Amino acid sequence: TRLVSDWSSDVCSSDLEPPAVATTITEDLLGIRIAGDPYALVVSELSGVVSGRKVVALPSRRAELLGVAGIRGGVVPVYALAGLLGYDAAPSAAAWLALCGSTDPVALAFDQLEGFLRVPRADLHATDRAETARRHVTQVVRVAGITRRVIDTRSTLGAFQSAAGASVSTKDK
């Protein structure tokens, strides 16, 4: 009989380790439609999605501003995502609102929510500015035979902040 100590010296420690499992880094997206075109929002850039909220219109110089809505005990400005992306269509009723930002949340209104998508991050491809005429689109992804433009909500928030800063500096002069 062999002693356990003799047997253990014969076994390589790498033989005892579980086989390496290939991990795929994924990105969670919401598939949406704007003016009939397929788009996606990055879930990690959102603080929520709501539907059925009444949007109270406000006078504004920004055509994209649909008004405000009561969400989570606060009043949130609601912008038409179609207008922010450069579509000429008149803003429609806001069926869905994607909430962005945590300190000063903003709601982005869109017509159709198609569903949740989990894609390998490697499937997201940067857009060339010459390839897309749409503002705030930095990536594309192909899922189930449909190519979707991925909206950079941080870019839309940056546009609001720079516009607000411009209006403040204009008032100061």
Image: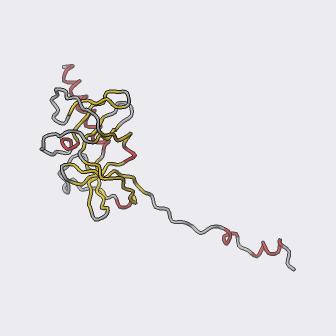
The quarter of the picture where residue 164 lies is top left
Depth check, front residue: 88 or 32: 32
Q: Is residue 90 left or right of residue 6?
A: left
Position of residue 4 measured from the top left corner of the image (x, y, whole percent): 83, 72
Name the residue rendered at 36%, 53% in the picture: 116
Looking at the image, which residue sits at the far front?
52
| Residue drawn at the location 49% of the way across and 62% of the way down | 23
- Residue 148 place in picture, x, y as percent: 27, 56
- Asked whether, in this view, residue 120 is left or right of residue 158, the answer is right
Observer-nearest residue: 161 or 54? 54
Q: Quadrant of the C terminus?
A: top left
Percent position of residue 108, x then y? 27, 39
When the figure is inspected, residue 166 is found, relative to residue 121, above or below; the finding is above
The outermost residue toward the top is 172
Name of the residue lying farthest toward the right: 1
Q: Quadrant of residue 89?
A: top left
User: In the rendered picture of this protein, how many numbered marks are placed on residues?
Assistant: 0
In the rendered image, residue 156, in percent from the top left (x then y), is placed at 27, 40
**In which quadrant is the N terminus drawn?**
bottom right
Q: Where 133 falls versus 92 (above or below)? A: below
